[in-house]
Image: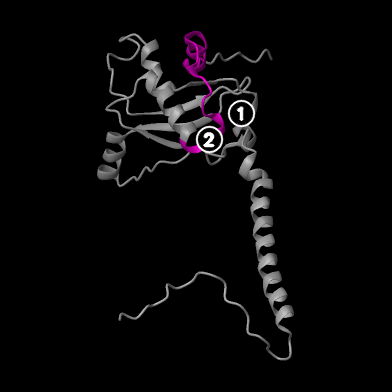
Amino acid sequence: MAEIIPFPSRSIASPAPEQGGVPLTQAKESFLGGLTGKFDQMLEEIAELYEDPSQVECTYCKFDLREGEDPESMEIDFASLAELVVFSPEIQKEGFETPEEAGGLTGVVRWGDVFLQSGDVYPFLFTIYTEDYVRHQLVTYGEKIVPSPKDVILRREQLSPPDIIRAVIKWANLYSPLQRGKPVRLESDAVLKDLICDPGIEVVVADPS
């Protein structure tokens, strides 16, 4: 007849009947009390994660994305935004230039900075890159561009205005979950023309004296 081998049990081993004169009941209570204490400690640590503002309060964020800029200019009050209004001068500027203004040159756009309307200002949000551009920069110059909250990479051969919206949606899904589902639109043409126009000629006024 084959020998029957009992399946190993996952139950918690009971403490020894008596060690050092400690009654069995007291030893069990001490053992279980230690487990309860550890369990309570775990619950407290989990609760602290939910109470940490950096983990849950992302409706008002500060993005210090560019070195050397005033950190105050990076503040974006996302909670007050019913929609995300964005633009990218590098991607959209060609649409406002005639061939003569552009010097007869219209190149393929493979990257562009994206700015978001926050009140009366337009802080920098991130830069879009095409996969081909990222590959070219790595092979040619050794520059490594990796996906991050300030670097969004799209599988596109070149970038057009609709790609700005695609990139913002991808950015929200990956890095700013509380912005998911908010409408995204491009800034109006009239405002954009004013925002990306070239500076006027400086007028020098002679000193009256």
Image quarter hosting the C terminus: top right
Q: Residue furthest bottom?
A: 20
**Could you tell me the amino acid type at mark 2?**
Ser
Q: Quadrant of residue 69?
A: top right
**Residues in magenta?**
174-201
* Residue 88 horizontal/vertical position (percent): 44, 23
Q: Is residue 155 magenta?
A: no
Disc 1, SS: helix
Marks 2 and 1 close (CB-CB < 8 Å) = yes
Residue situated in front as seen by the camera: 27 or 132: 27
- Look at the picture and state if 166 lies above or below 11: above
Which residue is pictured at 31% across the width and 38% down the height? Answer: 134
What residue would you read off at disc 1? Answer: 78
| Depicted 82 relative to depicted 12: above or below | above
Q: Is residue 153 visible?
A: yes
**Horizontal and vertical percent position of residue 93:** 40, 17
Mark 2, other Cα within 10 Å: few <14 / some 14–19 / many ≥20: some
